[in-house]
Amino acid sequence: MNYDVIIIGAGPAGLSAAVYAARGELKTAVFDKGIEGGQMNLTDEIENYPGFENVVTGYEMGMKMKAQAEKFGAEFKYEEITAVSLDGYCKIVETANATYCARALIIATGASPRRLNIPGEARLTGRGVSYCAVCDGALYRDKVVAVIGGGDSAVEEAMFLTKFAKKVYLIHRRSELRAEKVIQNRAFANDKIEFIWDTVPNEIEGDPTVQNLKLFNRKENRAFELPVQGVFIYVGILPNNNLFESRLDLDEAGFVKTNELMQTKLPGVYVAGDLRHKPLRQVVTAAADGGIAGWSAEKWIEENDEHFPKGTCDIMKKHMR
């Protein structure tokens, strides 16, 4: 089946791109193997998205964005993509069920926080376990929270959390931080932060929300518990770039480099949202990326219309077989 635009990923970036592309009267398809919303679905309460006076769940916001895209004619396909061809004027997308073609491709597969993979983590995600202090920090006003990690992000987010929490424990498996010295010094000077060194988490407990952390001090060979109401995990973030990493320009962490129009080095291929090299990964920035990508794809198709004679994609699909 042929489309003007195929969008891979139905998080806020992909959904926003679908709204803009479909509203531009482009035949648009959005592919995702799961439900709409992406990482938003891990958040019970979103309170920093403009226009929503009352908090909304990530799931609810995803459904609203999908309904808006469908209103303009976007189609949604729940199929896992197995292969892509990004070269030329016809982009080919293959799934286990079919082969699809588009004039432009918007990649919005996002990124995933690296998990600790300890008991309680998955069950309590969104119920006290978080991977984003900027997203959820305000929900922990006057509460006690723990931050797991020792890099720049962990230390910076621990300091951010002190704006709300009455106490922040920063738990690190080593005896010194990996963060830049200037960031470390600011954290050491903050009397709301207490450092727990040489320690790893073994389990997160609580029902229905986080209540306790089970920890192990490797230096002292000692197990102990820490009552907390929130756990923020910063042990790395992984870009979901498996299908594209050898074909696009990546930074040292594997995120895709684009220009301000969300264009990659390949004509007609755009990247939006958390997969992109950027300083802030939030629902609002992902949605902005998606809007720009959808608009850019529309303009690119208009400017290159002569390269898309009738049947071009059908010819390409036969060649792929």
Image (cartoon, rainbow, N blue to C red):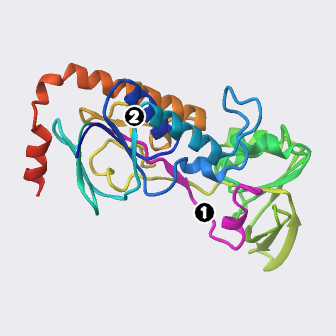
Q: Nearer the viewer, residue 119 or 102?
A: 102
Q: Are marks 1 and 2 in contact (CB under 8 Å)?
A: no
Q: Is residue 116 left or right of residue 321?
A: right
Distance from disc 1 to disc 2, alpha carbons, whole Å, reads 37 Å
Residue 108 painted magenta = yes
Q: Along the polypeptide, which appears first: circle 1 or circle 2?
A: 2
**x%, y% of residue 295?**
38, 24
Residue 310 painted magenta = no
Rendering quarter of residue 258: top left
**x%, y% of residue 136?**
74, 44
Q: Amino acid at mark 1?
A: Arg
Identify whether 236 is placed above or below 102: below
Residue displayed at 32% across by 54% down: 243
Q: Secondary structure at mark 1?
A: loop
Q: Quadrant of the C terminus?
A: bottom left
Identify whether 94 is placed above or below 291: below
Q: Secondary structure at mark 2?
A: loop
Q: Nearer the viewer, residue 261 or 236?
A: 261
Q: Is residue 142 left or right of residue 287?
A: right
* Disc marking residue 115: 1
Segment colored magenta: 104-129
Identify whether 8 is placed above or below 72: below
Residue 257 in view of the camera: yes
Residue displayed at 45% across by 40% down: 14
Residue 259 in view of the camera: no
Rendering quarter of residue 200: bottom right
Residue displayed at 70% across by 67% down: 123
Q: Is residue 223 left or right of residue 80?
A: right
Residue annotated with mark 2 = 73
Identify whether 303 is placed above or below 72: above
**x%, y% of residue 7?**
37, 41
Q: Amino acid at mark 2?
A: Gly
